[in-house]
Image (cartoon, grey):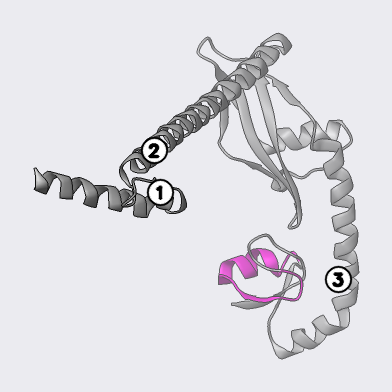
Amino acid sequence: MEVILLESFDRLGEIGDIVKVKNGFARNYLIPQKKALRANKENKDKFLKIKNDLLEKNKKIIEESKLTLKKIEKKEIIFIRNASDNGQLYGSVSPKDIANYFNEKKISIKPSNINLHSSIKKIGIYDLSIKLHADVGCNLKINVATSEENAKKQKIELETEIKKTNEPTKTVDNNQNEIENKSKVKMDDKISKKIDTSKEIIKDSEGNVNDLSIENPEKALKAEESQTSSIEEKK
């Protein structure tokens, strides 16, 4: 089914876009929630009349979402939960739990705005995404532990692990640069020795050194090889 979007949707489209969606998605969600209109001639005319109001409303939502984002983007989210000896939670942490956590701090975020990258059923630190609008969102971490003290330990362990992961890369890069520099020095030494040798061998008829080796080392080396071959033939 083709619909006219009345809101901006991540990965779907912007306000006013005509997009094709599954019939069930349109009938059960988009149209009843007044987030879209069926894309027929009548509704296209209707959209033109309400377009400016929708755009203005969308602008205000974006501004409010950005203000909310500033309140949460640097927040450390800690959940204290009971767990078994192996770290298994007695229950789980859901988007609704996280939404309630924010609501208690007078920050309005709906469960539908929260996306968990994996289910939270054990203690640990997890990634989650907050999407307040198609154009406004952020990534956060949630620290689930059995106590405040354990939450601090988990945070320190994660930071240490991240540092260890990054250090070898730098060491490898430094070693690689050192190897390349040594190779370059050796190559330069070889070329210098070749040029010095060619200066000694390449002489004109009067026994003077030919400057060819300085102006064109490659040509000098070829001349050296030619002269060496000639001496061997005479022998």
In the image, is residue 17 part of the stretch drawn in magenta? yes
Residue furthest toward the bottom?
41
Q: In this orientation, which residue lies closer to the viewer: 157 or 48? A: 157
Q: Quadrant of residue 97?
A: top right
Disc 3 or 2, which lies upstream in sequence? 3
Residue that appears at 56% across and 70% down: 22
Q: CA distance from mark 3 to mark 2?
A: 80 Å
Q: Quadrant of residue 14?
A: bottom right
The range drawn in magenta is: 14-33
Q: Position of residue 192 (x, y in %)?
A: 42, 37
Q: Amino acid at mark 1?
A: Ser
Taking the view exactly as shown, the residue that stands out farthest to the front is 206
Residue 146 is labelled as: none
Determine whether 73 is above or below 234 in the image.
Answer: above
Disc nearest the viewer among 3 and 1: 1
Residue 122 in view here? no
Q: Are marks 1 and 2 in contact (CB under 8 Å)?
A: no
Which one is in front, 108 or 180? 180
Q: Is residue 157 above or below residue 203?
A: above
Mark 1 residue element: helix
Relative depth, front residue between 122 and 172: 172
User: Mark 2 belongs to which amino acid?
Assistant: Asp
User: Would you identify the image quadrant in which residue 18 lies?
Assistant: bottom right
- Residue that carries the numbered disc 1 in the rendered image: 213
Q: Nearer the viewer, residue 185 or 81?
A: 185
Where residue 133 appears, x then y in whole percent? 77, 55
- Looking at the figure, which quarter contains the C terminus? top left
Q: Residue at x 70, y 14 (%)?
A: 152
Q: Which residue is mark 2?
A: 196
